[in-house]
Image: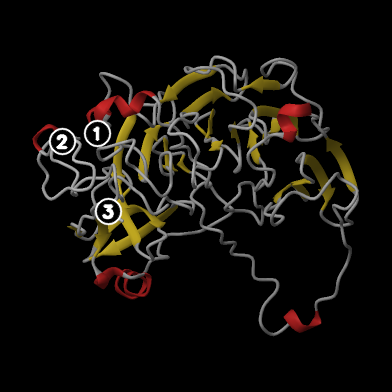
Amino acid sequence: MSRRSIRAATATWSLAAVVCASMLVSGQSGAKNGEWPHYGGDLGNSKYSPLDQINRDNVKTLRVAWRWKADNYGPRPDGNYEATPLMVGGVLYTIAGSRRDVVAIDGATGETLWMYRMDEGKRGDAAPRKTGRGVEYWSSPDGRDQRIILNTQAFHLVELDAKTGIPVPGFGKAGVVDMNEDFDQPVPADGTIGSDSPAVVVRDVIVSGPTLMAGTAPRSKQNTKGFIRGYDVKTGKRLWTFHTIPQPGEVGNDTWLNDSWSYTGNTGSWAPLAGDEELGYVYLPIEGATGDFYGGERPGNNLFADTLLCLDAKTGKRVWHFQMVHHDMWDYDLASPPNLINITVDGRPIRAVAVTSKQSYLYVFDRVTGKPVWPIEEKPVPGGDTPGECIRRRSRSPPSRRRTMCRACRKAI
């Protein structure tokens, strides 16, 4: 099978080396006040809490206080139960069942305080992913307005009052935004787009990444496109859309040769996102394009597939990006949430973002500028002879100067 060049970090910056050389955790405090208000604890996905009441000396004395079961909340979703409960003010918020019923649970007693269920009918039954990773929490600065935000499996955005579970009247239509509306492309067919991970809220903007129908071995070169959208947290109004497959006139459109931008799909962001409230940036791990294991219908480097993408949360404008794999045909998309870390390298403090890849590389960037913290060596990979695929990229020259002939089908691309 033919192959594309892969950007890969040098062997010297494996995770162990980074930790030893740079004191990776310096400056990281993790979730605050003993709470867990986001999927990763905080917006930076530190997944760390400084609580120390339970330690290695007393952990052996722990006993079960209560159990809460999801058995009565509809069919079990396909795959694993992947939700991470949030905890705010002593209340746990999570989802259950294949319809992603939202529940609030008293953290001290295990009592169910409220439940919200949305029946999406045939559209929900056809959703590409039933499993969800949980919900997002937002509150006003004074704490009076507290909301739970749900991405449904069939691509609705729901906002609930965190105290009651009642949909917020002023958000969308009776608390619900149908993200299939105002879609910026043809209205998708049921089962082609949904949501897998929670949204994030940065500077009062909800940023939601879509999940697409799997592009593993697609029957068609066409699929719904995984554009990223930002919504006002109070009203549900769509503020912006970022085209992860650039349209004519946009940066990166020339990396989709033979007009393949017009029909290719996927390039969503199904893995969890990260946000920096101080900078106002959101960091998105973008998946590959249709299809995962064959790219003959989409010649070119295919930006922004397989890319760590930094956007301004207020405007949706691109701040910086880095494409890990050009013209992916191995399903090497980014499947892990970005981690925002504060590190010190050669005596210099750096606000960084790190993301692990399926190739077992840890990519680390200055999260303000996008500059790699350590040099990243780009290596070409030998080409192959799969029909429709071409000799691989060997230089940094523009795509228009790299047109060549596929050795198998003799087509110019």
Residue at the disc numbered 2: 399
Q: Position of residue 180 (x, y in %)?
A: 60, 21
Q: Secondary structure at mark 2?
A: helix
Q: Position of residue 29 (x, y in %)?
A: 50, 59
Mark 1 and mark 3 lie on one chain; the one further toward the N terminus is 3
Please give the name of the residue rendered at 34% of the width and 43% of the height, measured from the top-left corner.
295
Q: Are marks 1 and 2 in contact (CB under 8 Å)?
A: yes
Where is the C terminus found, in terms of image quarters? Answer: top left
Mark 1 and mark 2 lie on one chain; the one further toward the N terminus is 1
Q: Secondary structure at mark 1?
A: helix
Look at the picture and state if 138 lies above or below 11: above
Look at the picture and state if 303 lies above or below 366: above
Number of marks in picture: 3
Residue at the disc numbered 1: 255
Q: CA distance from mark 1 to mark 3?
A: 18 Å
Q: Nearer the viewer, residue 277 or 309?
A: 309
Disc assigned to residue 2? 3
| Quarter assignment of residue 387 | top left
